[in-house]
């Protein structure tokens, strides 16, 4: 009787372990959405840089040297960009005239630099291929082509201000009345969840994203001789967040430890059987 109870006990343990193992694998795909933030790379940014930018100052991304027992399940890259422009418009004509001052963002882009993860390069390539109107190609100082690029702010009309009968020789603020400038902002957030994409963000070291800007300014209407005295500043930042969890290894009931437990149990059964036999002597 005791023998049977002990045997049933170990059978129950084995069944429980099997159930837990299957439950772990069943729940594992759903765990990704609940994974906590493991690491945020140091913020890389620049502020109030006068344009046009030509490859510097760079944004630097830091790779995550994940411990061996950590599974990284998602990497989220966030890039912010901002252009602020302002100044004055002067009518150099000999008489009053009316005209529009227009500013355009031709491009504000980040070109992947040294050691950039393949996932970001692929993102840049897909952006470049999807923009049929994009005709800007960047080159380094040696003449090598730097495309593809990640567009932080898409090409757009940046500013447009009308001046009515601005007097000869007079100047007026270029920008809104309250701040004297125009601001255009954008945020690019890109998650990566595939193992191959994530692997490029893991390890030691850094990579760079190199900024380029092209800003256009035009006068439309009037008789000419109107001059824009304009300064444009660029801001940008790069943040990388890593999500994941501690790797969980299900208890394998076929392992040596469990076999050892079974051996111990059978040893106990044998001992009990001997005691029972001896009690009848």
Image: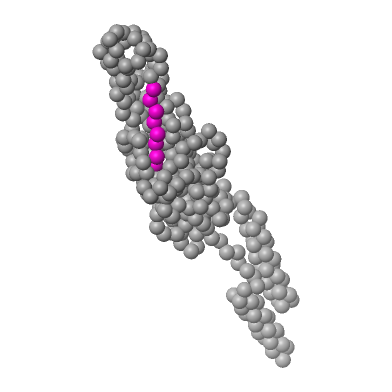
Residue located at (64% from left, 58% from top): 25
As drawn, 95 above or below 183: above
The figure's colour scheme reads one colour
Residue 127 % position (x, y) = 53, 40
Q: Quadrant of the N terminus?
A: bottom right
Q: Which segment is the magenta one?
A: 211-218
Given the current orientation, which residue lies at the most extreme bottom position? Answer: 281
**133 horizontally vs 204: left or right:** right
- Residues 189 and 34: in front is 189
Residue 187 % position (x, y) = 46, 36
Given the current orientation, which residue lies at the most extreme left position? Answer: 169
Q: Quadrant of the C terminus?
A: bottom right
Can the viewer see residue 100 in this picture? yes
- Residues 170 and 118: in front is 170
Residue 197 % position (x, y) = 54, 53
Residue located at (67% from left, 64% from top): 18
- Residues 196 and 1: in front is 196
- Decide whether the magenta segment is chiefly helix, strand or loop: strand
Q: Does the segment drawn in magenta span residue 267?
A: no
Residue located at (35% from left, 15% from top): 224
As drawn, 72 above or below 182: below
**231 horizontally vs 280: left or right:** left
Q: Does the segment drawn in magenta span residue 214?
A: yes
Residue located at (40% from left, 34% from top): 214
Residue 51 % position (x, y) = 34, 35
Can the viewer see residue 186 in this picture? no
Residue 107's image quarter? top left
Residue 139's image quarter? top left
As drawn, 245 above or below 251: above
Exactly how many numbered labels are in the figure?
A: 0
């Amino acid at each position: 009787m005791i023998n049977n109870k002990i045997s049933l006990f170990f059978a129950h343990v084995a069944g429980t372990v099997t159930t837990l193992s299957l439950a772990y694998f069943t729940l594992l795909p759903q765990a990704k959405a609940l994974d906590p933030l493991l690491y945020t790379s140091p913020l890389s940014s620049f502020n109030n840089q006068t344009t046009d930018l030509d490859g510097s100052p760079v944004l630097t991304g830091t790779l995550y040297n994940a411990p061996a027992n950590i599974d990284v399940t998602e990497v989220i890259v966030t890039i912010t960009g901002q252009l602020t422009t302002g100044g004055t418009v002067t009518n150099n004509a000999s008489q009053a005239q009316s005209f529009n001052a227009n500013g355009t963002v031709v491009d504000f882009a980040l070109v992947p630099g040294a050691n950039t993860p393949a996932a970001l390069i692929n993102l840049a390539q897909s952006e470049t291929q999807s923009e049929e109107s994009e005709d800007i190609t960047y080159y380094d100082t040696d003449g090598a082509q730097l495309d593809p690029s990640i567009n932080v702010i898409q090409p757009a009309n940046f500013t447009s201000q009308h001046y009515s009968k601005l007097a000869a020789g007079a100047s007026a603020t270029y920008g809104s009345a309250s701040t004297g400038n125009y601001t255009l902002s954008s945020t690019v957030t890109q998650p990566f969840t595939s193992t191959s994409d994530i692997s490029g963000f893991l390890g030691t070291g850094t990579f760079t994203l190199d900024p380029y800007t092209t800003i256009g300014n035009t006068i439309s209407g009037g008789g000419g001789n109107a001059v824009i005295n304009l300064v444009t500043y660029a801001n940008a930042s790069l943040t990388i967040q890593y999500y994941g969890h501690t790797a969980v290894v299900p208890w394998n009931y076929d392992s040596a430890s469990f076999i050892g437990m079974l051996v111990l149990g059978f040893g106990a059964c044998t001992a009990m059987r001997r005691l029972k036999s001896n009690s009848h002597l």
